[in-house]
Image (cartoon, rainbow, N blue to C red):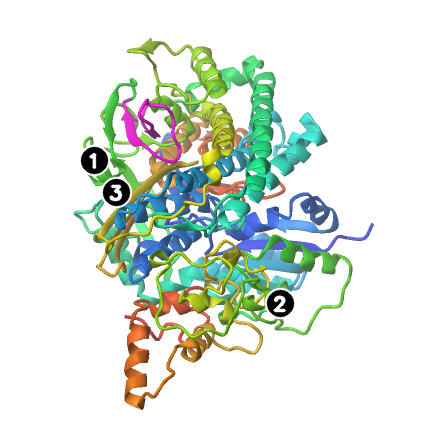
Amino acid sequence: MTKKPGLSMYWASSCGGCEIALVNINEKILEVIDKFDFMFCPCLLDTKKKDIEALPDKSIEITLFNGAVRTEENAEMANLLRKKSKILIAFGSCSNDGCIPGLSNLYSAKDHFDTIYLNNPTVSNPGGIVPQRETEVPEGTLHLPEFYDTVRTLSQVVDVEYFIPGCPPESNQIWDVINSVIEGVKLPPKGSVIGAGTSTVCDECEKIKEDKKIDRFYRTYEIIPDTKKCLLEQGIICMGIATRAGCGSLCPKVNMPCSGCYGAPDGVLDQGAKMIAALGSILNLEGDLTEEEITGHTNKIMDSIPDYAGTFYKFSLAGSILKNSVRK
Amino acid sequence: MKKVTIDPITRLEGHGKIDIFLNDGGDVANVYFQVPELRGFEQFCVGRLAEEMPIITNRICGVCPEAHHMASLKALDDLFEAEPPDAAKKIRELLYMAFYVTDHTTHFYALGGPDFIVGPDAPPSERNIFGVIKKVGLDIGKQVIETRAQNHHVIEMLGGRKVHPCAGLPGGWSKPVTEEERKELEAIAKKNIDFALFSLKTFDKIVLNNPDLLELITSDIYTHQTYYMGTVDDENHVNFYDGMVRVVDPEGKEFVKYHPKDYMEHIMENVESWTYLKVPYLKKIGWKGFIDGMDSGVYCATPLSRLNVSDSMATPLAQEHFEKFYETFGSKKKNGRYQPVHFRLSTHWARLIEMLYAAEHMLELASDPEITSPEIRNLPSGKAKGVGIGSVEAPRGTLTHHYVTDENAVIQKVNMIVGTTNNYAPISMSLKRAAEKLITKGKVIKDELLNKIEMAFRLYDPCLSCATHHLPGTMPMIVKIINSGGDVLDTFTRD
């Protein structure tokens, strides 16, 4: 009997939605188990970690790594699985771009500890206790992995073969990738984004675009949009124009703006910068305006967005060219 | 060990770590259950646009994003003083019922239930979804997959996405329900009722008719007398989406019933340096440590807790099973209410009764002609008032979101007390109890210890689905036994 290829899925700093998305391939999950030796989320502390360490290098065919690198332990696991896997895939927005928890890079580790454990309305902490890497208790010593100062994407820590974007990746896309491996389809060049399109969410969106310019932005709670028309052209910041296709424009379908979870499309280095540039071209600056008036008007419109980082880099801050240079 | 994913701000990732310390006599001195993971939502939500919190806090937990979406929306309704139109409320609630059905189904058949269905003494390799299928038949396995698939389809139809729904707005919902969709929802709700009834029958046949299992459920390894918390409606029925938070004492007397907005008067959190997760307790009683009883502020917020704080269920079939539940355990009525059941393993049964209620209520909502009304949004009339608090019952406990904003509705401060977090102390206590019963004078019954710890853990369904049990089904775990000299005597692992 030929040995089945090993498939592993490891969960670093993430929410579990990637696992749910995988399980949501429904009955096809039985086929995955049939075709692969499914080493799903292997247990990796102490002896078990030693078991993985004892494996020959590159002996796991594919590792789907979801979650960002936030703690000491996440980093150790990323390095170990890199060594043991033939193909390491960054699976989901956290490992690709840092995802929403990547916004954590706007603050230091100390900021987090102060807010969560000290200055919190329901915390009673007269002793000013915060978690420690080592704690002496009457019975012995307890250890915690270090909470790093920043969130890093997988490829900022180790070499990565492929990237499957999305928060979470859509189940049909996950199945397409797995199925093409099962069918022996030739893999694309290293570094490719797989399980997604190459263009933008706008290309998948059925809402009518009229090349309309806008006079102002609306927060989503300020407006009931025309559901047939492009949300951006109605002044709602929809990230579709700067976001990779692949989801089938799920959020705009229910009249909510794309929030950008599939990351930047092909050929775009920085999703947030691309979006800001796109907004520049859609603002209504027609008429006989001086340069000063244009600047003033643009600034006024842009000021109506009180959170640039969270709006334009909601999913991509940790992986962006900004990284943590915007820390407050 | 793998992970006990404790949902909120702090998911327990990588692995839940349980260190068992023995004293000189070889008995258990203490047990520490650590949560070695922190992501920091309470900090990095500061500076965000308030209206984006329902899609930001979704990412706290991919297993129960629906619960965060709803709690967040209710906090926004409060912040913007925008009450959603009835149809929007009903759509939110309908989605939430579908979510409860799929979530409780997953737990019963794939996560917690295998302990019973396949049996607590079956080898770990059998105690999983595949073992369940072997015992109850492949058809059932297919039905489980279908129930999950259909209810996730509902979540996508109403909420835009199967995982991390996005359709909620302060004062409403972004997409109406068509008549065609309503009919489909009605059909799925009916199937859910059948499936819930079938699941209760299975529980009856396999568990209740088995004296050994009943004895295990009522044994003192799995009994803790604590306070209980849950949300109830005007008539003190269990309610998942809205109502007052009721807390009863270990004797079943109402300790307090409060509006979620007043949560700060009733809940406090303790910080320990050996874990990233905070430990909540009842403020008016105080933190006395990981102990049970009337004088300890430890409370529990689970399906069992919700039944214990309620007078009855809001739907007829669930009510029948509610009565059977209390009668079976010999609970007497006092002042018109059943006395609380303290057997923690009965949480599995309570979860199925909740599944039936969710399915029945889903049908009520899907049959309501108002659900197709296009009136699904109320635009806020003024500016954000500066504070918004909202709560729902997440499957794993009462979930509270609390935001403070500036007048532009930009977040300045966030506090969240999340489902599983409520149960940090009870879970720790259950683990310690299991260890104490199974380790005496340095003698460790290895397999039984692992099994019993596993069961103590799973009954709380600590938001870990894929974590405590990954797909092949067993729970990866590391348990260290350390003697009074600090030497590691033994390390048990299971993968």
Asked which quadrant contains residue A60, the reply is bottom right
Q: Is residue B231 magenta?
A: yes
Farthest residue to the right: give it: A1
Farthest residue to the bottom: give it: A290
Is B439 displayed left or right of B212 in the figure? left
Is B233 displayed left or right of A99 in the figure? left
Residue neighbourhood size for the residue with mark 2, other residues' Cα within 10 Å, grouped as few (<14), some (14–19), many (≥20): some
Compute the Cα span from label 3 to label 1.
10 Å
Chain identity of mark 2: A
- Tag 1 and tag 2 share a subunit: no
Q: Position of residue B299 (x, y in %)?
A: 31, 31
Q: How many marks?
A: 3
Viewer-nearest of discs 3 and 1: 1
**Residue type at numbered disc 3:** Asn
Chain identity of mark 1: B
Chain identity of mark 3: B
Classify mark 3: helix, strand or loop: strand
Residue at coordinates 52% horizontally, 34% vertically from top-left? B101
Is B37 displayed left or right of B160 in the figure? left
Identify the residue under disc 3. B270
Q: Which mark is residue A197?
A: 2
Magenta residues, start to end: B225-249
Farthest residue to the front: give it: A287
Label whose residue precedes the other's in the sequence (3 or 1): 3
